[in-house]
Amino acid sequence: MNRKVSIAPMMDCTDRHERFFLRLISKNVFLYTEMIVDEAISRGNKKKLLEFNINEKPVALQLGGSSPKLLSEASKIGEDFGYDEINLNLGCPSKKVEKNKFGACLMKEPKLVADCLSEMQTKTKLPVTIKTRIGYDNVEDYENLYNFISILKSTGVKTFIIHARKAMLGKFTPKQNLNIPPLKYEYVYKLKEDFPNENIIINGGITSVEEIKPHLKKTDGVMIGRAAYHTPYLLAEIEKEIFNNNDVPSRQDVIEQLIPYIKSELNKGTRLNQIMRHTIGLFHGQTGASYWKRYLSENMCVRDADVKKIDHIMDKIKFNNVDTSVGQSA
């Protein structure tokens, strides 16, 4: 499975509409769902939570939870829905997540995490992976990270996605946890040296192809997050520079290919703003980008957006000097 470049699971961002949109730009990046809680899958509307478009593949299901039983059941359900990987969230630092005992707080309980991973692997044939941080609160020495990964490795897990910041549990907001704790990429590099046979993927603060390339020399893959959401056409550059694929669509092509999907989804009851909100950054750095953002914000990213306007969106691009060429994201 090619995880050379992947897009991080992001709450309120990497839903199925965002993933379909990103897949139009890149055929090779590996995609992840938002975190979905095991109990929600057990008790909720499984189809609503888990159904996705086959064109999104390859795509991984990220789970949140700490019950070996519920996580294993959710893993099997995820496999049945057609996902390519099951990922356990051990990195989310929010107070709500900690209160419900999943995310980064589980770094305090490696044996429980190991029990979860072992049970998950008994119920699914898919790769089970983890996403975590380098530490938490004042526990930030490399030895602790090494020991944590060693325990999880003993369960048979082979792929470890490491956000190179520690989590400040209950002290910072999720946004602060993405910026304030310092990045320690050297910890992730050292993990790869110490675990040469495992897949070590680096994450955190990576925003460009120029930054991706040196990380790939020291790890097995790079996961990018906010940069992919706010400047999605970065994926076109990744296709060309990392995957050696020059057959990438222009920005206009992306919108033209998205329109049939939008119309199909509208017929199912999806609201226009649920899809179009993900496209605001498509023309970032290009001539006319401010017009595109303003037009979407005023017409297509509001709850009662007029669905008829989707038929005229290409005219808005063509006649308002929006640069649709194939090029780099600024």
Image: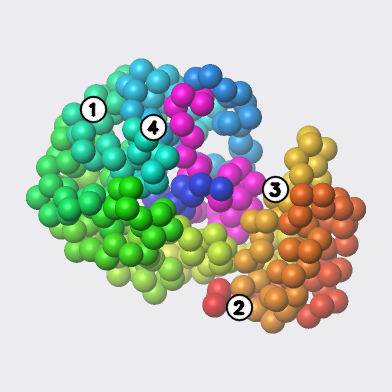
Q: Residues within 10 Å of mark 1 (few under 14, many from 20)?
A: some
Residue 96 seen from this side: yes
Mark-to-mark CA distance, 1 and 4: 14 Å
Of 162 and 248, nearer the camera is 162
Instruction: Give the answer, above or below, for where 40 lies relative to 9.
Output: above
Query: Which amino acid lies under the numbered mark 4 shown in the image of this protein?
Result: Asn
> Based on the displayed image, in which of its 4 quarters is residue 76 positioned?
top left
Q: Which segment is the magenta one? A: 13-41
Q: Which amino acid is tagged 3?
A: Gln
Q: Which of the two marks, 4 or 3, is nearer to us in this view?
A: 4
SS for tag 2?
A: loop
Q: Secondary structure at mark 3?
A: helix
State the CA–CA distance, disc 4 to disc 3. 27 Å
Residue shown at the point (31%, 43%) measured from the top left:
104
Instruction: List x then y, in percent, for residue 256.
Output: 76, 59
Distance CA(mark 1)–CA(mark 3): 37 Å
Q: Are marks 2 and 1 in contact (CB under 8 Å)?
A: no
Observer-side mark, 2 or 3, equals 3
Q: Is residue 188 above or below residue 41?
A: below
Q: Position of residue 120 (x, y in %)?
A: 34, 24
Residue nearest the viewer, comparing 121 with 58: 121
Return the residue found at the far front: 171
Which residue corresponds to mark 2? Answer: 285
Circle 1 residue: 112
Which label was assigned to residue 100? 4
**Which quadrant holds residue 324?**
bottom right
Image quadrant in which the N terminus is located: top left
Q: Is residue 250 visible?
A: no
